[in-house]
Image (spheres, helix red, strand yellow):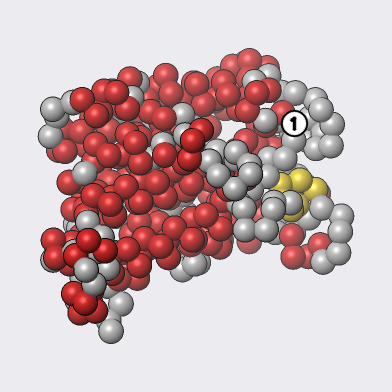
C-alpha cells in the first residue's frame, strides 16, 4: 500500500476501537493524535528510514515451495489454516470458498527464506514489546489513561518518560507492518510479485485511487478537521470497498501476535496463488502476471480482493492494538 492507503487503514482501525462498547484507553491515545497517522503509518516506507542494509526485508515474508528437511513444519492444511485465522477475518471465507487451490497445493510445504530477524512477523512482534514498554514508562498524562499503575515510572527523569504523542506515533508505525502482511505480493516469492513488475505496483495504485486524496499526508497535516471528523471521513471509505465492520473487535486467535502474523502471511500467500495460479505462473520462473491480465479482466475477483484485503488490514491492525492494550491490563 502507498502512503494514503496506509494512513486510511490506521485511522479506520482507530475508529473501530473508538466505536467499541468497551472502549479502551488505546483509542483515546490514537484519537487524540489521529492526524499523526499521515506520517507514522508511512514512516517505515520512507527511503531515509530504511536501515539495516535492505529496503524491504522486514516488510515481507515471501513464500515459495520448500523441499528441504522437516517439510512437515512448513506444511499447513487448509482446514488448519482457517482455524488459525478465525472466522472474523474475510480471508477465512475467501479461502474457504476457493476452488483454485486444490488438495495437492495445500499438501505441499511452503517456506520463506528471510535474513535472520528480518521479516514482518518479527517486526510486529518486536514493536508490540517495545510499545508495551513505552506505555509502561508513560508520563503523568499517559499514566492517567493506562489500566494499571506503574510506580517505577515516577523514578525516571520526566524527559525519559513517554508522551502520548510518542506512543501514538509508534502505534501508527506498527500498523504499517500489520497492513503489509495482508498484501498478497508481500508474501509471494515469485518475480511477478516484485514491486516493479506491474501487478504489485498497479494493485496498490488501484487501492490508493479508491481511498482518495483526503488521506494524503499534505492534506491531513494541514486540515483543521476535528479527530471526530477525520474518523468519520475514514468510515466513508467503507462503501468504496464494500466493507461492513462489527463494533466488536475480536481478540487474537493464537494469543501470540508473532504467530498470528505468520498465519496471516500464509493466507496472503494463498491468495497470491489464487490471483496468479501456479499452474500458469510457476514459482521458479520469471513469468510476470500483468495486472490487466489477472485482475482487470476479472472484475469480480478484483472487487472481492479489494474487500478482503482492506477489511482484514483494518481489522488486523485493530486486533493487534487491542491485544497490546490487553497486555497492560493484566493484573499485577
| Residue 139 versus residue 10 in the image, above or below | below
Q: Disc 1 on helix, strand or loop?
A: helix
Residue 87 vs residue 187: left or right?
left
Q: Position of residue 267 (x, y in %)?
A: 60, 48
Q: Residue at x 86, y 64 (%)?
A: 69
Quadrant in which residue 289 is drawn: top right
Depth check: give the residue in front, 210 or 302: 210
Q: Position of residue 234 (x, y in %)?
A: 27, 33
Q: Residue at x 23, y 72 (%)?
A: 156
| Residue 312 versus residue 200 in the image, above or below | below
Depth check: give the residue in front, 297 or 185: 185
How many other residues sit within 10 Å of disc 1, few (<14), some (14-19) or many (≥20)? Answer: some
Residue 54 vs residue 245: left or right?
right
| Residue 262 versus residue 51 in the image, above or below | below
Quadrant in which residue 277 is drawn: top right
Q: Which quarter of the rendered picture does the C terminus lie within?
A: bottom left
Depth check: give the residue in front, 260 or 88: 260
Q: Position of residue 53 (x, y in %)?
A: 63, 44
Residue 141 vs residue 79: left or right?
left
Q: Is residue 304 visible?
A: no
Q: Residue at x 51, y 26 (%)?
A: 204
Q: Is residue 169 visible?
A: yes
Residue 317 vs residue 138: left or right?
right
Q: Position of residue 239 (x, y in %)?
A: 33, 28
Q: Residue at x 28, y 69 (%)?
A: 136
Quadrant in which residue 137 is drawn: bottom left
Q: Residue furthest bottom?
A: 332
Q: How many marks?
A: 1
To which residue does mark 1 refer? 191
Amino acid at each position: 500500500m502507498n502512503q494514503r492507503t496506509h494512513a486510511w487503514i490506521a485511522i479506520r482501525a482507530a475508529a473501530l476501537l473508538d466505536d467499541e462498547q468497551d472502549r479502551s484507553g488505546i483509542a483515546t491515545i490514537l484519537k487524540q493524535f489521529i492526524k499523526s497517522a499521515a506520517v507514522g503509518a508511512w514512516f517505515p516506507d520512507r527511503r531515509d528510514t530504511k536501515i539495516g542494509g535492505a529496503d524491504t526485508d522486514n516488510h515481507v515474508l515471501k513464500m515459495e515451495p520448500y523441499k528441504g528437511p522437516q517439510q512437515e513444519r512448513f506444511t499447513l492444511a487448509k482446514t488448519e489454516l482457517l482455524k488459525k485465522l478465525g472466522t472474523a477475518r474475510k480471508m477465512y471465507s475467501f479461502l474457504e470458498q476457493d476452488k483454485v487451490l486444490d488438495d495437492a497445493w495445500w499438501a505441499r510445504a511452503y517456506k520463506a527464506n528471510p535474513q535472520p530477524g528480518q521479516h514482518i512477523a518479527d517486526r510486529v512482534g518486536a514493536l508490540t514489546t517495545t510499545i508495551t514498554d513505552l506505555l509502561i514508562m508513560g508520563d503523568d498524562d499517559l499514566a492517567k489513561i493506562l489500566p494499571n499503575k506503574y510506580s517505577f515510572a515516577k523514578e525516571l527523569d520526566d524527559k525519559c518518560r513517554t508522551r502520548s504523542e510518542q506512543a501514538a506515533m509508534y502505534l501508527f508505525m506498527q500498523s504499517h507492518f500489520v497492513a503489509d502482511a495482508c498484501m498478497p505480493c508481500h508474501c509471494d516469492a515469485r518475480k511477478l510479485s516484485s514491486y516493479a513488475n506491474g501487478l504489485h505496483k498497479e494493485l496498490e495504485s488501484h487501492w490508493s485511487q479508491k481511498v482518495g486524496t483526503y488521506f494524503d499526508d499534505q492534506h491531513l497535516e494541514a486540515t483543521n478537521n476535528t479527530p471526530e471528523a477525520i474518523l468519520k471521513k475514514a468510515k466513508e471509505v467503507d462503501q468504496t470497498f464494500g466493507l461492513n465492520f462489527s463494533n466488536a473487535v475480536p481478540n487474537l486467535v493464537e494469543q501470540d501476535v508473532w504467530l498470528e502474523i505468520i498465519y496471516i502471511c500464509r493466507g496472503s500467500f494463498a491468495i497470491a496463488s489464487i490471483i496468479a495460479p501456479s499452474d500458469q505462473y510457476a514459482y521458479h520462473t520469471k513469468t510476470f502476471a500483468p495486472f490487466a491480465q489477472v485482475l482487470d479482466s476479472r472484475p469480480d475477483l478484483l472487487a472481492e480482493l479489494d474487500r478482503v484485503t482492506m477489511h482484514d488490514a483494518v481489522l488486523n491492525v485493530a486486533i493487534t492494538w487491542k491485544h497490546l492494550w490487553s497486555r497492560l491490563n493484566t493484573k499485577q
